[in-house]
Image (cartoon, helix red, strand yellow):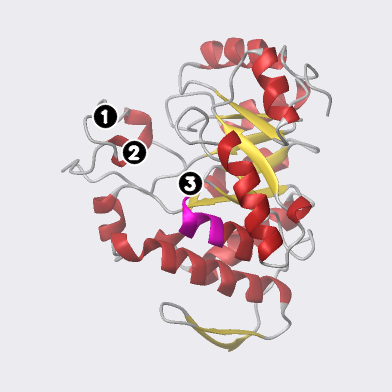
Amino acid sequence: MHIGVSIFPTDQTIQPLDLGPAVEDLGFESLWFPEHSHIPASRVTPWGGVKGASPLPEAYWRTHDQFVAFGAVAAVTSTLKLGTGITLVAQRDPIWLAKQVASLDTISQGRVLFGIGYGWNKEEMAQHGTAYLERRAILRENILAMKELWTQQEASFEGEHVAIEPSWAWPKPIQQPHPPIILGGAAGPKTIAHIVEFCDGWMPIGGRHDLLGKIQTVREAAQEAGRDPDSIEFGVFGAPKDPAELERLADAGVNRAVFGLPPADPAVVLEKLKDRAKLIGVVAG
């Protein structure tokens, strides 16, 4: 099982240039950054879209840009994998996003893990011109268009939400055919269909979504669609810190466990990082 960590990289916590080498030196496989472009102060949508949720933490509107932050990390590390956890694809222009992902993969020599998600903040999406109920369809077309840009010498795409005339777009990713695409969120019927159609993995938040109960469902859906179930990896954000629980996840087919770090002072983050590092190797990789 691969072990990684995630954190909201903000202007108030340890900076990517310092965090990246520390994570790599301690032996973690991957570092994951989430993203939010901004948080409208109206705060209409509750945290995670869950009614009665706690107030939204300030880190959500203080995050660095994912790709700028990972560019810094790539410059000071050599083996650490760089995971977007997650990129809000429906809020982004797919042409620019394809170039950002490919550029980071090139600069890092093939270390990108492209975590994606639908998003939950309705007012944030609205500011980007994204209709909440269309976010799944937009994400799907954005990803399909990005795959064309990554893999074709002269790429084009025609959909309901995305249209790209025959175009040249470089760089192409170092990883072939492209960096692994890993979808987050609850695995309902639509999400499972998307995992099978255009993703390389599924990685929900532990404790929030039914992971173990859905792994076999995803594998069966892949089989029915004519896809090799073993071509889909499974991971979990917010992984449990109990070795026995990690063993149980590994036995169920989970390939990657990612522990959360607090967006706190550098000393606090580094202390938590060293504590999480004790779990590396608990489950055979």
Q: Position of residue 22 (x, y in %)?
A: 69, 22
Q: Is residue 187 magenta?
A: yes
Q: Is 45 placed above or below 247 here?
A: below
Structural distance between the alpha carbons of marks 2 and 1: 8 Å
N-term mark: 3 or 2: 2
The 10 Å Cα crowd at callout 1, few under 14, some 14 to 19, many 20 or more, is few
Q: Which of 235/275 is in front?
A: 235
Q: Quadrant of the C terminus?
A: top right
140 vs 180, left or right, is left
Residue matched to label 1? 53
Q: Quadrant of residue 31?
A: top right
Q: Which residues are magenta?
A: 186-193
Q: Looking at this rendering, what residue extends furthest in the bottom direction?
A: 166
Q: Residues within 10 Å of mark 2 (few under 14, many from 20)?
A: few
Q: Say which residue label 2 marks.
A: 48
Q: Is residue 47 left or right of residue 75?
A: left
Q: Is residue 71 visible?
A: no
- The answer to which image quadrant residue 223 occupies is bottom right
* Residue 133: x %, y % from top left: 30, 62
Q: Are marks 2 and 1 in contact (CB under 8 Å)?
A: yes
**Observer able to see residue 99:** yes
Q: In the rendered image, which residue does mark 3 sit on?
A: 65
Name the amino acid, label 1.
Ala
